[in-house]
Image (cartoon, helix red, strand yellow):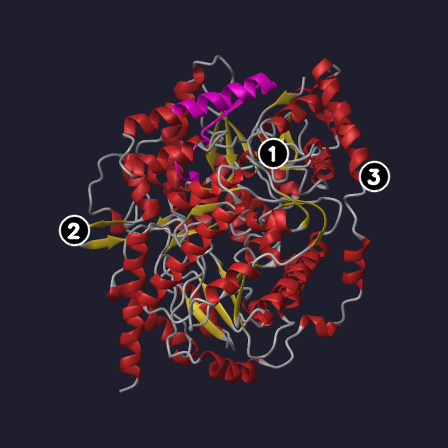
């Protein structure tokens, strides 16, 4: 019979219990023993949920305190040299210092670099491979978690990131990190032998780099790795997701693994190749339920598509979601913001397990009443979504069709605009600013919750927001920043905030997804054509500008970021949805300008993460993404300065496209990489202005003035100083006020020092 398994489950808890507990631990309000107990409770709840749904082989090892890649690095003693000098109280304390940075003995230990996990909105911590640090097996949480799960009496499957993905996604000081592969395999072998000793039969080894266009030497390394691991007393399920495997299929079929998992949601064409090449006596796991989006599956179509596969593999066919369910919310059961029809269209992690079980049971001819219910609901949803009047807005579609080439360009080239902007804004050299948000204090969160619950009136809430903006403007004036922001106290999230203000977009109540560490977001649900009924940000931006003679930035989130950080409708091309969002933002930009806002920031931190995993598809995506940004920004006067911001982006391979965005100023995250990201701007003659982030806002450590000055001098070696801005890496909403003010003061003081030196 078809075996039902799962690749991973959301680890944050149904009510973000993990986030809350870790943050209480950081504040000293929770002991490590108490935090460990919260983790055990979440893992047990997750396993029981999967058992109740009908999952037959439980994943163990998908839980991580901050990030699985970080946890694996720590388990293999991949600890950066700067963190080795201090003896932490426990492995967990060390893990959090690696993730967040630390300050010991009057010296700062910078946090490990963080970047996006393939084309998702999840961030992973980048392993740092140093030649003088050998791999060795330390304390692995996987082994303890296996002991916990064994008590449930179900077959287990260990979950582990593969050695090639681990090496490929890391940072190293060697020309060829593959020369350390055998050393790493020794450590994997030790760990997997320990797993096998605990009676675990299968290990799911995730190698998502198989969906990338890998160099030949990396492709060839797979045979070596899995031939070596095949000698161990444990069966390997080689797991790929997020796209089609790029290695040729005869080669894949020769690899000595016990099973192979394919993502049929992102790459359904792989099934035909598997039918042709994959041995029928080996396990084939098919990812048939979408682990990346939240729409109910067409279960009847899925069942029909799998009938041939079942005939071919019979007892060796496994079914799973396409990837780990960590990328979707936990459950729809508590949702109350969504109307009944829209909610019926959605499926979160818990519901996806039931969809998966339904498919397997129908294939095996053992469907019960619950399965019949899920199939009937699926068929009803397919029909109602196709017929629903809320999907299509002909006014929006007509407006997109009527766009001309002029709508995608500023009226004048940057060189001429820059002169007008300097006259209008009267900024000094090395102008200072921040990225947009300021601390979201407990007071702000409490007032927002009280307003939503109706415990305070709209007028009372507005008075509170106005007072917060007054305070933020006054603090920035006192610190000496040159271009101010209003601090965004009215915004819960840079994307979610816009959901209820746009037609065709819905907001969930409990649809939390982990972005990194304890940072969770609620992606909006784009279900229909998008438009802007009325201004969304003008009121508070104009109010803030009225409080200062200095320019105050209007803050917007760009079309590609709203798209990539939302759950997007599946019945319209994503590029078309981006154009609709861009038109809505274009109207907002024009209204901001009319309200006297002369600096407008349209953030696109998610531009690069939307890149297809295979390069031959990049150009089409980048062309549409860049055009959507320009559509949103191009209606303003030459004297209005357009900024954009990008997070965690490797710019070298897309720098030409970034230049085509034609933003007057781009701010980017560079502090964790010590300005290495600016190499792209040195090799490419970037024409506009750049603000390289000079301190890491994800760390509570106040930056050292010497460090900031060093970074800015490095930046000035690559970018002319007259085109450089000084700013933090990202928004400051997650920080506290004391560290925020202390950090900005250091940053402003360094900028003033550089100005003085430049005048001599």
Which residue, given by chain and number where applicable, does mark 3 sit on?
387
Residue density around tag 3, few if under 14, some if 14–19, many if 20 or more, within 10 Å: few
Q: Are marks 2 and 1 in contact (CB under 8 Å)?
A: no
- Image vertical order of residue 366 relative to residue 358, above or below: above
In percent of the image, x 34 and y 60: which residue is there? 695
Q: CA distance from mark 2 to mark 1?
A: 48 Å
Nearer the N terminus, badge 2 or badge 1? 2
- Image vertical order of residue 84 relative to residue 690, above or below: above
Residue 608 in picture, x, y percent from top left: 55, 57
- Asked if residue 457 is among those painted magenta in the image, a careful observer would answer no
Q: Are marks 3 and 1 in contact (CB under 8 Å)?
A: no
**Element class at badge 3:** helix
Q: Is 150 situated left or right of 214 in this image? A: left
Q: Quadrant of the N terminus?
A: top right
Residue 734 in picture, x, y percent from top left: 39, 48
Residue density around tag 1, few if under 14, some if 14–19, many if 20 or more, within 10 Å: many
**Element class at badge 2:** loop
Stretch of the chain drawn in magenta: 40-68
Which residue, given by chain and number where applicable, does mark 1 sit on?
261
**Element class at badge 1:** strand
Residue 435 in picture, x, y percent from top left: 44, 61
Nearer the N terminus, badge 2 or badge 3? 2
- Asked if residue 47 is among those painted magenta in the image, a careful observer would answer yes
Nearer the N terminus, badge 3 or badge 1? 1
**Quadrant of res 634:** bottom right
Q: Is residue 164 visible?
A: no
């Amino acid at each position: 019979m078809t075996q039902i398994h799962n690749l991973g489950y959301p680890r944050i808890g149904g009510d973000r219990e993990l986030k809350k507990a870790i943050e209480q631990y950081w504040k000293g309000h929770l002991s490590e023993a108490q935090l460990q107990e919260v983790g055990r409770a979440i893992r047990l709840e997750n396993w029981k949920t999967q058992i109740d749904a009908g999952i037959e082989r439980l994943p163990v090892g998908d839980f991580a305190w901050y990030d699985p890649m970080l946890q694996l690095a720590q388990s293999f003693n991949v600890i950066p040299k700067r963190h080795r000098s201090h003896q932490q109280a426990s492995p967990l304390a060390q893990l959090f210092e690696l993730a967040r940075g630390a300050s010991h003995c009057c010296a700062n230990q910078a946090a490990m670099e963080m970047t996006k996990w393939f084309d998702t909105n999840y961030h992973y911590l980048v392993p740092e491979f140093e030649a003088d640090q050998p791999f060795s097996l330390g304390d692995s949480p996987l082994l303890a978690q296996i002991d916990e799960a064994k008590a449930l009496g179900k077959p287990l499957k260990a979950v582990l990131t593969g050695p090639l993905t681990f090496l490929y996604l890391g940072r190293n000081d060697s020309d060829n990190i593959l020369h350390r592969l055998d050393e790493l395999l020794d450590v994997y072998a030790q760990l997997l032998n320990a797993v096998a000793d605990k009676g675990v039969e299968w290990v799911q080894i995730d190698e998502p780099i198989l969906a990338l266009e890998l160099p030949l030497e990396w492709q060839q390394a797979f045979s070596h790795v899995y031939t070596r691991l095949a000698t161990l007393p444990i069966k390997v399920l080689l797991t790929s997701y997020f796209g089609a495997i790029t290695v040729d299929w005869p080669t894949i079929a020769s690899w000595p693994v016990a099973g192979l998992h394919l993502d049929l949601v992102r790459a359904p064409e792989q099934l035909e190749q598997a039918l042709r090449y994959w041995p029928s006596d080996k396990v084939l796991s098919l990812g048939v339920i979408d682990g990346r989006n939240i729409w109910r599956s067409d279960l009847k179509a899925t069942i029909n598509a799998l009938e041939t596969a079942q005939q071919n593999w019979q007892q060796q066919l496994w079914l799973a979601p396409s990837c780990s369910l960590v990328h979707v919310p936990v459950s729809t059961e508590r949702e109350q913001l969504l109307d009944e029809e829209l909610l019926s269209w959605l499926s979160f992690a818990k519901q996806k397990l039931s969809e998966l079980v339904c498919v397997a049971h129908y294939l095996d001819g053992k469907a019960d009443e619950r399965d019949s219910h899920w199939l009937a609901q699926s068929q009803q949803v397919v029909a109602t979504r196709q017929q629903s009047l809320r999907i299509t807005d002909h006014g929006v579609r007509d407006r997109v069709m009527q766009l001309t080439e002029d709508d995608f360009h500023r009226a004048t080239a940057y060189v001429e605009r820059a002169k007008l902007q300097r006259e209008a804004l009267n900024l000094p050299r090395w102008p200072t600013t921040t990225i947009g948000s300021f601390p979201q204090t407990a007071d702000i969160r409490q007032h927002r919750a009280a307003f939503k619950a109706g415990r305070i009136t709209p007028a009372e809430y507005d008075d509170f927001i106005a007072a917060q903006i007054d305070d933020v403007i006054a603090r920035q004036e006192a610190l000496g920043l040159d271009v101010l922001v209003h601090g965004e106290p009215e915004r819960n999230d840079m994307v979610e905030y816009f959901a209820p203000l746009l037609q065709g977009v819905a907001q969930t109540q409990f649809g939390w997804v982990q972005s990194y560490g304890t940072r969770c977001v609620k992606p909006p649900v784009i279900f229909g054509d998008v438009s802007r009924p009325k201004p969304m940000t003008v009121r508070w931006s104009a109010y803030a500008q009225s409080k200062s003679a200095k320019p105050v930035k209007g803050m917007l989130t760009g079309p590609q970021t709203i798209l990539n950080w939302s759950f997007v409708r599946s019945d319209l091309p994503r590029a078309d949805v981006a154009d609709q969002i861009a038109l809505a933002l274009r109207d907002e930009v024009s209204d901001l300008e009319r309200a006297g806002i002369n600096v407008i920031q349209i953030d696109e931190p998610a531009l690069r993460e939307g890149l297809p995993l295979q390069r031959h598809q990049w150009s089409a995506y980048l062309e549409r993404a860049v055009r959507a940004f320009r559509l949103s920004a191009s209606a303003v006067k030459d004297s209005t300065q357009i900024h954009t911001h990008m997070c965690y982006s490797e710019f070298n391979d897309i720098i030409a496209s970034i230049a085509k965005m034609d933003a007057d100023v781009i701010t980017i995250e560079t502090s964790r990489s010590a300005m290495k990201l600016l190499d792209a701007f040195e090799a490419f003659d970037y024409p506009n202005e750049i603000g390289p982030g000079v301190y890491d806002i994800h760390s509570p450590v106040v930056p050292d003035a010497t460090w900031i000055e060093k970074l800015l001098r490095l930046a000035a070696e690559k970018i002319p100083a007259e085109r450089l801005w000084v700013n933090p890496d990202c928004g400051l909403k997650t920080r506290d006020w004391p560290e925020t003010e202390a950090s900005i003061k250091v940053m402003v003081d360094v900028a003033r020092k550089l100005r003085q030196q430049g005048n001599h």
